[in-house]
Image (cartoon, rainbow, N blue to C red):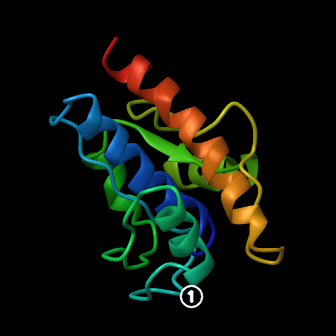
Amino acid sequence: MCTGNICRSPIGEVVLRAKLAEAGIDDITVTSSGTGGWHEGDPMDPRASAALRRHGYDGSSHRAREFDRAWFDDRDLILAMDTGHLAALNRQARGRTDVPIELFADSDVPDPYYGEDTGFDEVLLQIEAAADRWITRLHP
């Protein structure tokens, strides 16, 4: 999860799906969402999509959506792109402990939205490294 579901979290979704497929893991469903619905139904930011293309991924089917609290009932794991989103998810969880809520990466994935295009490539590289760790963790 990220803020608007047009930059970091869709990159994370696309990369993690691709890495799962590459590892032959087909029993995990990956989705992404944002803390707000400002971009609901929109494709990902063109700079995020371009960064994905440059690295061999296809994010063209993504459409932004807002996190739905009901998803706590049917998700096995929820990942946040930064500590602010992690805190927002924990507030929404209201003390539930049945669904782990964790950071996607070892540290906050910075929001590239207001920066230069190169920020999207840097975020993608951080997400790729984190996705590799998730593959190992989810299917040792």
Q: How many marks?
A: 1
- Front-most of residues 96 and 104: 104
Q: List x then y, in percent, for residue 125.
A: 64, 45
Q: Which residue is mark 1?
A: 38
Q: List x then y, in percent, for residue 129.
A: 59, 34
Quadrant of res 98: top left
For image coordinates 28% across by 47% down, the residue present is 73
Q: Tell me the quarter of the image containing the C terminus.
A: top left
In this picture, residue 56 sits left or right of residue 102: left
For image coordinates 42% across by 60% down, the residue present is 32
In this picture, residue 115 sits left or right of residue 44: right
Furthest toward the top, the residue is 140
Residue 83 visible in the displayed image: yes
Position of residue 118 relative to residue 131, above or below, is below
For image coordinates 54% across by 55% down, the residue present is 92
For image coordinates 73% across by 53% down, the residue present is 122
In this picture, residue 59 sits left or right of residue 114: left
- Front-most of residues 28 and 124: 124
Q: Report the amino acid beneath label 1.
A: Trp
Q: Classify 10 Å Cα crowding around label 1: few (below 14), some (14-19), many (20 and above).
A: some
Position of residue 59 relative to residue 64, above or below, is above
Q: List x then y, in percent, for residue 65.
A: 42, 76
Residue 6 visible in the displayed image: no
Quadrant of res 116: bottom right
Q: Secondary structure at mark 1?
A: loop
Q: List x then y, in percent, for residue 88.
A: 64, 56
Furthest toward the right, the residue is 115
Furthest toward the left, the residue is 27
Quadrant of res 8: bottom right
